[in-house]
Image: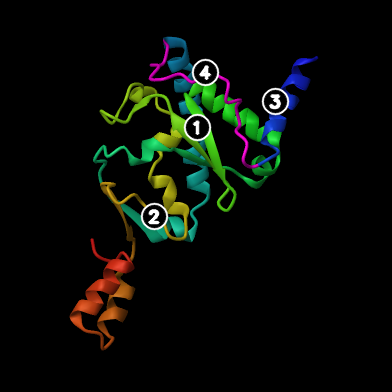
Amino acid sequence: MTAWRKVARAGAILVSSDRPCLPRTAPFRDAVKDRPTLALLKRVVLVLWSAELWLRRALSRGWRRRFWDLRGECRACGCCCVEPSIHVDPVTWHLPLVRWLLCRWQYQVNGLEYQRQEGRTHDLIFRCSHYDPVSKHCDSYASRPSMCRDYPRVLLGQAWPELFETCGYRVLARKPEVLRAGIEATSLSPEAKAKLRRKLRLDS
């Protein structure tokens, strides 16, 4: 059997949405710190990703990215590390082999084990071997992948970004003056106005 046939056969496990990207019989690496060669590879990938991200954001300034602003700082609550997810494009989602290759890369390079997938949002859910749920620390934080470095800023491209309740960051409207003026012009009670401002993320 050729190498490509082996890959195609392994990729067939993704045809059914309830089956994993990787065989469950494969041993999972628990709390394995990055080796020097792997850390170097991740550094190279990080440089390429950073350049691509900067170029993409410079050329594409959508209204959603201008509408939301991010405030606060990380409290190290660990919620975003428990089940990290990757949102995939339609091509990756509908091609099992491509999904398998993506999951294999995440497993071998970033130590992420596939858990499940969300069909409604086209998200792949993983478990991270570098995260310790007891101490809430990452044993390879310096070489963490791009999906960890860009969170939660990556959510600002969504229509209504949602953060974890314990997250130290908060999402606010970037230009709230017009909405604030409209709320103040209504006949609502002060309590109702304050509640509406909070729901619309207008209070800093």
Q: Label 1: how many residues lie within 10 Å, few (<14), some (14-19) or many (20+)?
A: some
Dominant secondary structure, magenta: loop
How far apart are labels 3 and 4 at the CA level?
Answer: 16 Å
Residue under label 3: 10
From the top left corner, tell me how far across and down residue 19 is, in percent.
62, 36
How far apart are labels 4 and 2 at the CA level?
Answer: 34 Å
Give the amino acid type for the residue marked by disc 1 in the picture.
Trp
Q: Which residues are magenta?
A: 17-35
Q: Which label sits on residue 49?
A: 1
Question: First in sequence: mark 3 or mark 1?
Answer: 3
Position of the C terminus, as image quadrant, is bottom left
Magenta segment includes 115: no
Residue under label 2: 162
Dot 2 lies on which element? loop
How far apart are labels 2 and 3 at the CA level?
Answer: 35 Å
How far apart are labels 4 and 1 at the CA level?
Answer: 29 Å
Label 4 or label 2, whichever lies nearer to me, is: 4
From the top left corner, tell me how far across and down residue 67 is, in percent.
40, 61
Question: First in sequence: mark 4 or mark 1?
Answer: 4
Dot 3 lies on which element? helix
Give the amino acid type for the residue marked by disc 3 in the picture.
Ala
Label 3 or label 4, whichever lies nearer to me, is: 4
Q: Label 2: how many residues lie within 10 Å, few (<14), some (14-19) or many (20+)?
A: few
Q: Nearer the viewer, residue 177 or 35?
A: 35
Position of the N terminus, as image quadrant, is top right
